[in-house]
Amino acid sequence: MALNPWLAISIFALVILLFTIPLLSLPYLIVFPRRKENPFRDMPFESGQVPQGDARHRLAMQYYPFVLMFVVFDVVGMFLFAWGISFSQIPLDSSLVVLIFLVLLGAPLAYALRLALRRENW
């Protein structure tokens, strides 16, 4: 006997509510006593040292291209993994498009490598 799809969704939502509401309210029922206010304990510190000066300082801009390229290549790696798994089932013309994309992706990688080698003096 097949269930009505809306009935199945309603049962699923009810089960979610029956499990999440008690789990979210449980910490408030068995909470540990609150700690007393202590100005020394609430002070910010860094590695055991009280910070001196302004907490905001600028980061070097030279690392932003590497961070952005890491994110781009990480996402591209996910898609290439899926493409590599289904490589034998994909038609050749679709694979050629991906191969052209990989060649074009090599340009930013070469640029990042050139920047890294120039900075590190390898």
Image (cartoon, helix red, strand yellow):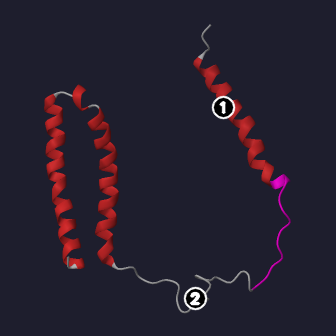
**First to last magenta residue range:** 28-39
Q: Which of the two discs, 2 and 1, sits closer to the camera?
A: 2
Direction front: furthest residue: 122
- The three-letter code of the residue at mark 1 reads Ala
Residue at the image position 14 percent from the left and 50 percent from the top: 103
Image quarter of residue 44: bottom right
Closest to the observer, 116 or 18: 116
Above or below for 8 versus 16: above
Mark 2 or mark 1: name the one nearer the start of the chain: 1
In-front residue for pair 99/28? 99
From what the image shows, is residue 45 above or below residue 9?
A: below
For disc 2, the marked residue is 51
Reply yes or no: does residue 36 show up in magenta: yes
Q: Is residue 89 left or right of residue 51?
A: left
Residue 28: percent from left, percent from top: 81, 55
Secondary element at tag 1: helix
Q: Which of the 4 image quadrants contains residue 47?
A: bottom right
